[in-house]
């Protein structure tokens, strides 16, 4: 067995920063859900599974160091932090503060994961074994997506009509 094959066969775990990113994303979604409420049954029926699948797909790509999905997630996180700061300036509330802090924690954890040995290993060798905890993180990402799909769309009138798809991270 070569050194590369031996290294590829070793098990390693996803760093803690990836878990922090996942749980901070859950907190962000719960804060948004508490602030806006739930979507209607018709809208949630479509958006919950679709958002769960999409967020899980993107997150699996980030964990596996796929650069297009990593850039996409980074842009979404940056926009979440920026939007949270703007919300705080416009009309601060406890839920908006919680969401903004969670977005900042998620962004810091995202950067930490990008600098980890796990990310570097997966970036260098696309055939490397998946780290321990991969499935759990993807399941957590699906939860984040489902919560985003369950959240009512932002509508200043408080009225919602038709089917809306909102994907949040």
Image (cartoon, helix red, strand yellow):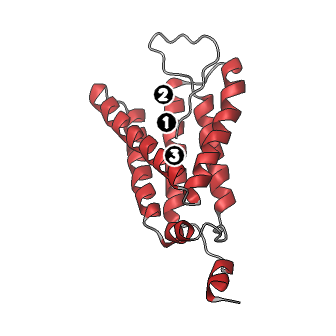
Residue positioned 68% across, 41% down in the render: 53
Residue 35's label in the rendered image is: 2
Q: Residues within 10 Å of mark 3 (few under 14, many from 20)?
A: many
Disc 3 is placed on an element classified as helix
How far across and how far down the image is residue 149, in percent? Answer: 62, 31
State how far apart marks 2 and 3 are (Cα): 15 Å
The reply to whether discs 2 and 3 touch (Cβ–Cβ < 8 Å) is: no
Above or below: residue 91 compared with residue 126: above
Residue visible at 65% across and 61% down in the picture: 134
The residue nearer to you, when weighing 43 against 54, is 54
**Cα distance, mark 1 to mark 3?**
10 Å
User: Residue 84, labelled with which disc?
Assistant: none
Q: What residue is shown at x 54% (from left), y 72% (from top)?
A: 121
Describe the element under mark 2 as helix, strand or loop: helix
From the viewer's perspective, is the residue at label 1 or at label 3 nearer?
3
Q: Which residue is mark 3?
A: 25
Where residue 7 appears, as percent x and y from the top left, is: 62, 82
Quadrant in which residue 133 is drawn: bottom right
- Measured Cα–Cα span from mark 2 to mark 1: 6 Å
Question: Where does the image place residue 37, in percent across and percent down from the top left?
Answer: 56, 24
| 51 left or right of 65 in image | right
In the depicted view, which residue is nearer to us: 4 or 51?
Answer: 4
């Amino acid at each position: 067995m070569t050194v590369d094959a031996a290294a590829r066969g070793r098990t390693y775990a996803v760093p803690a920063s990836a878990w922090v990113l996942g749980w901070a994303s859950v907190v962000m979604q719960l804060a948004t859900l508490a602030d806006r409420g739930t979507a209607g049954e018709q809208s949630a029926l479509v958006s919950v599974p679709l958002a769960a699948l999409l967020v899980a797909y993107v997150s699996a790509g980030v964990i596996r160091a796929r650069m297009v999905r990593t850039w996409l997630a980074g842009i979404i996180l940056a926009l979440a932090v920026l939007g949270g700061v703007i919300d705080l300036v416009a009309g601060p509330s406890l839920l908006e503060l919680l969401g903004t802090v969670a977005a900042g924690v998620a962004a810091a954890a995202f950067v930490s994961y990008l600098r980890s040995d796990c990310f570097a290993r997966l970036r260098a060798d696309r055939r490397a074994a998946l780290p321990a905890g991969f499935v759990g993180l993807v399941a957590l990402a699906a939860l984040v997506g489902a919560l985003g799909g369950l959240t009512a769309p932002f509508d200043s009138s408080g009225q919602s009509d038709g089917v809306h798809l909102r994907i949040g991270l």
